[in-house]
Amino acid sequence: TKPNPQNMLIGKQKKAKAEGYDTNSLAIHSKVNASDFIKSSGYLDILGEANVILLDDPKWKNHEKTTEEVVEYMKDVKVLGPRELRVLLRWRKSMLETLEAERKAVEGEAQDVEIEEDLTEEQIEDRAMAEIDELIAKASEDEKAALKKKKKKMLKAKARVLKRRELKMIIDGDEGPQAEDQEVFQLKKIRKAKELAEITKETQAPDFENVEGKGAGWRGWGGREWLYLEISLFSAVF
């Protein structure tokens, strides 16, 4: 009679039984969860004793390596030959690789968070800039334009922050021009303009292009016109 491939697998493992999995339970419960088959160190014992392997986790069921062929083999493990058993063993290896990749991804995220907590605000901003540069290098033309615009905004915001810091270093506690200061400055200009209007209300402003009786242009101006110009310029500045 043709030897059972499962018995061959069991024979290889008789010398060193894997710990941590009760093989006696396999004889009673012939259905085994795929998670146990994947994660157990005694996976060969499980494969040798099980009748059915159940896809107990959507992760295994929806995996790209879980083909129709693999699903069919899991429905009746006892009748499988060496080639079919090797297919299941390769499938198990792929699932282990998936678990390892997930573990590394979680560890990497945790490490990134830990590193970021130790960074200063400026270092975090620099890292964000570097990430945008990397995205720009890989992006399409439309995406590049949007990313460059975002980077420009970030650079402007950073420049404003640095400018405020510089002002604080020059004059301690000075936050730079405030809105109230600007309003006072505007009021002073208005008052001076009104005072100037009172002083000169009886005198018409000279025509820059043509001063009557003096010829065309500023060359014909007298002392009065020049005085008016100086007062106007002084008021506009202060």
Image (tube, rainbow, N blue to C red):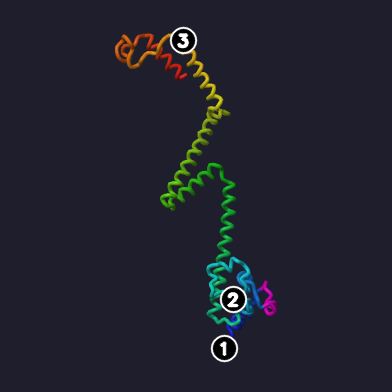
User: Residue 142's x, y, as percent?
Assistant: 42, 49
Give the amino acid type for the residue marked by disc 2 in the picture.
Met
Instruction: Tell me the residue at 46%/51% (across/down).
Output: 135
- Span shown in magenta: 19-29
Instruction: Between label 1 and label 2, give the one nearer the viewer.
Output: 2
Q: Looking at the image, can residue 72 be seen? A: yes
* Badge 3 density bin: few <14, some 14–19, many ≥20, Cα 10 Å: few
Give the amino acid type for the residue marked by disc 3 in the picture.
Ile
Q: Secondary structure at mark 1?
A: loop
Could you give the CA–CA distance between mark 1 and mark 2, rounded to whole angstroms?
Answer: 21 Å
Left/right placement of residue 206 relative to residue 151 reads left
User: Residue 212's x, y, as percent?
Assistant: 33, 11
For label 1, the residue is 2
Up the image or down, 132 lies above or below 100; here it is above
| Residue 7 location, quadrant | bottom right
For label 2, the residue is 74
Label total for image: 3
Instruction: Tell me the residue at 62%/73% (across/down).
Output: 54
Instruction: Between label 3 and label 2, give the one nearer the viewer.
Output: 3
User: Which quarter shows the N terminus?
Assistant: bottom right
Q: Looking at the image, can residue 15 be seen? A: no
| Residue 222 location, quadrant | top left
Could you give the CA–CA distance between mark 3 and mark 2, rounded to whole angstroms?
Answer: 104 Å
Tag 1 near tag 3, CB within 8 Å? no
For label 3, the residue is 199
User: Residue 69's x, y, as percent?
Assistant: 53, 75
